Amino acid sequence: MKLLIIGTLEGHMTTASQIAIKRGAKVAAVDSIDQGLDHLRSGKGADLVLIDVRLNVERLCKGLEAEHINTPVIACGIEGTEASSAAGAIRAGAKEYLPLPPDPDLIAAVLEAVAEESTSIIHRDPATQRVIKLADQIAPSDASVLITGQSGTGKEVMARYIHAKSRRATGNFVAVNCAAIPENLLESELFGHEKGAFSGAIARRVGKFEEANGGTLLLDEVSEMDPRLQAKLLRAIQEREIDRVGGSKPVKVDVRILATSNRNLQASVKAGEFREDLYYRLNVVNLSLPALSERPMDVPLLSDYFIKKYTEANGLPARALSKEAQTMLQGYHWPGNVRELENTMHRAVLLASGDEIGGEAILLTEAPAPSSAPSPAPSAETPNASAAASQPPEATQAGSAAGGDGQPLVGRTVADVERDLIIGTLGHCLGNRTHAANILGISIRTLRNKLKQYSEEGHAVPAPGES
């Protein structure tokens, strides 16, 4: 665990760092937000940031977001500080608020929670056990691993698990979301840049390869990477050296590569969208994560885990699931997998009243499958199969000539129908771009381009969290 402390708080931060060191954390301390950002830019990394609440927490969080640094932030304040300071820090993007002087047990709990959340795999089902057994076998090696599975199955959690079990566990684990970073910035994000290399390069920036030196680099959703950049990535993996943007000489790196994809990379290779040589470099070992519908024994265990997590996070009393709620969860097909289950349990915790979480608090994204047995998750090609199966024949026949909103298809352009389908699917996914792209069977890049076009044409596009 690497901890970065920003601020002084009259000596209380020093006490907090001493407690963290005794608990096994490696601690670095700086006085200002600019120094903290420089520390993270330089490739030294951190698993957690503690910041004095009197500093500009919002500026730090926005700075981290702008530079795609995914490090959780915890604000700290002297006990007795106005409650509005704590609430403001949370609204600004801090994950938690920690009162000071620090309590040793509370510091330990925070460190353990961050470590557990990033590497624990809650499971009981034999399907999950088989994947974890294979992960345990290959973790100590330096072999590249391609982790595949539907969106929301926990691919990044599995990558962190492999790193924690590897000989590189004491090194950095660095994750890069290839789908979330624009193409023109991803090269700099991966390989770094020199000052003045391009417009906006106001300082030298160490890339993720150098930051992960001696540790593990996760290329999340690698299938979305531009083909030009794929060639540079292949060279970096083969030669174990990288070229910074604007740099004059190569830099040697020692990094283990893990990659994830929710798409069929073999099909992408055949379609000419992904380099075949890079595919084989990444796919030394393939870990295919089962959908949640294929691991039904994990549903009750995960449900209890998320209930405990969100009751504690929201300061609510502990509640158990009612029999009705348990039946609803077990009978659902979970198209959004573990991520959807987590969101469902978070909502249920907030909506529940009484001593139990009843069926009225379980709000499912789609209608439950009509069969009494657990049904497999629908494929990307048939996202509305369960809904169509529950409709009367005349409704199904009408659907062949009408869109999902009831508008007739005859007489409309293909572009109009496509727009309604894409925006409707995005709304159904509560604005989650990755989930919507998976259901539609298109790349996240294609989806983004379409949404940008629709927005420029004046159509309303659901933002994340909106239906």
Image (cartoon, rainbow, N blue to C red):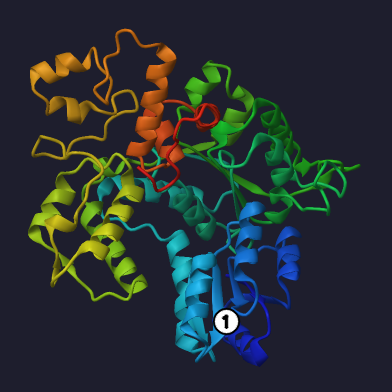
Give the secondary structure at mark 1: helix
Which residue extends farthest top? 411
Using the rendered view, name the quadrant where residue 151 is placed: top left
Residue 53 x, y percent position in the rendering: 59, 78
5 vs 267, left or right, is right
Which residue is rendered at x = 65% and y = 26% of the image? 227
Which residue is rendered at x = 70% and y = 62% of the image? 40
Q: Is residue 123 above or below residue 364?
A: below
Amino acid type shown at disc 1 = Ala
Residue 129 x, y percent position in the rendering: 32, 50
Question: Few, some or many C-alpha atoms within 10 Å of disc 1 (few <14, some 14-19, many ≥20)?
Answer: many
Q: Is residue 73 above or below residue 125?
A: below
How many callouts does the rendering have? Answer: 1
Q: Is residue 287 visible?
A: no
Which residue is rendered at x = 69% and y = 31% of the image? 229
Q: Between 465 and 184, which is closer to the camera in this rendering?
A: 465
Q: Between 100 and 19, which is closer to the camera in this rendering?
A: 100
Q: Is residue 100 above or below residue 293?
A: below
Image quarter hosting the N terminus: bottom right
Residue 219 x, y percent position in the rendering: 58, 43
Q: Is residue 385 visible?
A: yes
Image quarter hosting the C terminus: top left
71 vs 133, left or right, is right
Which residue is rendered at x = 83% and y = 41% of the image? 198
Using the rendered view, name the quadrant where residue 257 is placed: top right
Q: Is residue 418 above or below residue 148?
A: above
371 vs 408, left or right, is left
Residue 281 x, y percent position in the rendering: 61, 33
Instruction: State the residue position of label 1.
Output: 20
